[in-house]
Amino acid sequence: MRKKTYAAAALLVAAALTLTACGSDNGDNSVATVSAEAGSGKAATVLDKPFEKPDLVLTDTQGKKYDLRAQTKGRPTLIYFGYTHCPDVCPLTMNNLAVAKKQLPKAEQNKLRVVFVTTDPDRDTPTELAKWLKGIDSEFIGLTGDFATIQAGARTMGISIEPTSKDKNGKLVSVHGTQVIAFSPKTDGGYVLYGEDATVDDYTKDLPKLIKGENP
């Protein structure tokens, strides 16, 4: 069972974001807190203080250096941290995004950047990321690199990730935030957040607005 805990942030409207040990039944969850507009019942949370895009230079599925800020500048960008051995939330989230993306006109599909940053870089090599993403959407960008660098980049957006470890059954799991953050093509700020409960329909409805940097 997943349990949620809540933390208060002084002078901020706080939203608690549960972190999930994907594939683990140990029940350990953590909390990240962000400033956001009051809940509206929508899947999307429009942040009143957008996140700065992480200053990450990692390795893509071709084994080449990928400067996240430089190579997604001015483009609508969705960023998600997860890992390929995750049996549930990660593939579901990425498949939801892939299905919704295909509903866009081709020109808008070409503008969108969906970035999957691994939280398990020891196992998620460029080759492994490429193979996994090929089964979802070969246009999605997969990034790997030094764990400490990835962890620090995630932290700038209020997303906590922990080193891969063994659960009580001896299975390797990665504990990580399950939120998708959308970055505006107008400002390059991360201004909209989605939790793991966001559906294909939610993304299908919102992507046309996110492409333009509008509020969903």
Image (cartoon, rainbow, N blue to C red):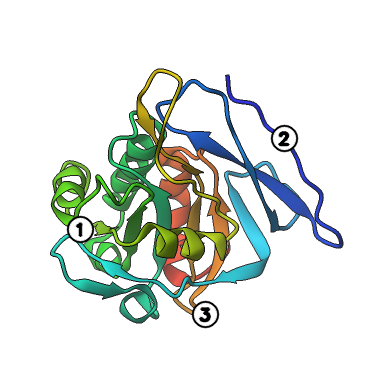
Rendering coords of residue 210 (x, y %): 46, 63
Q: Say what amino acid the circle numbered 2 marks.
A: Thr
User: What residue do we see at 40% from left, 18% from top?
Assistant: 169
Helix, strand or loop at mark 1: loop
User: What residue do we see at 17% from left, 47% from top?
Assistant: 128
Q: Say what amino acid the circle numbered 1 marks.
A: Glu
Query: Would you name the residue on which mark 1 appears?
Result: 139
Q: Kindly report which numbered mark, 3 or 2, lies closer to the viewer in this rendering.
A: 2
Query: Would you name the residue on which mark 3 appears?
Result: 187
Q: Earlier in the sequence, mark 2 or mark 1?
A: 2
Rendering coords of residue 42 (x, y %): 62, 44
User: What residue do we see at 57% from left, 44% from top?
Assistant: 43
- The answer to whether residue 216 shows anywhere in this view is no
Helix, strand or loop at mark 2: loop
User: Gap between marks 3 and 2, in whole Å?
Assistant: 32 Å
Q: From the viewer's side, name the closer residue of 15 and 76.
A: 15
Horizontal side of 158 relative to 145 (left or right) equals right
Labelled pair 1, 3 in contact (Cβ < 8 Å)? no
**Mark 1 surroundings: few (<14), some (14-19) or many (≥20) residues within 10 A:** some
Q: From the viewer's side, name the closer residue of 77 and 63.
A: 63
Q: How many numbered marks, from 0 up?
A: 3
Label drawn at residue 5: 2
Rendering coords of residue 49 (x, y %): 68, 69
Rendering coords of residue 106 (x, y %): 22, 62
Horizontal side of 2 relative to 204 (left or right) equals right
Q: Earlier in the sequence, mark 3 or mark 2?
A: 2
**Quadrant location of the N terminus?**
top right
Please tell me in which quadrant of the rendered image residue 58 appears: bottom left
Extreme right residue here?
Answer: 11
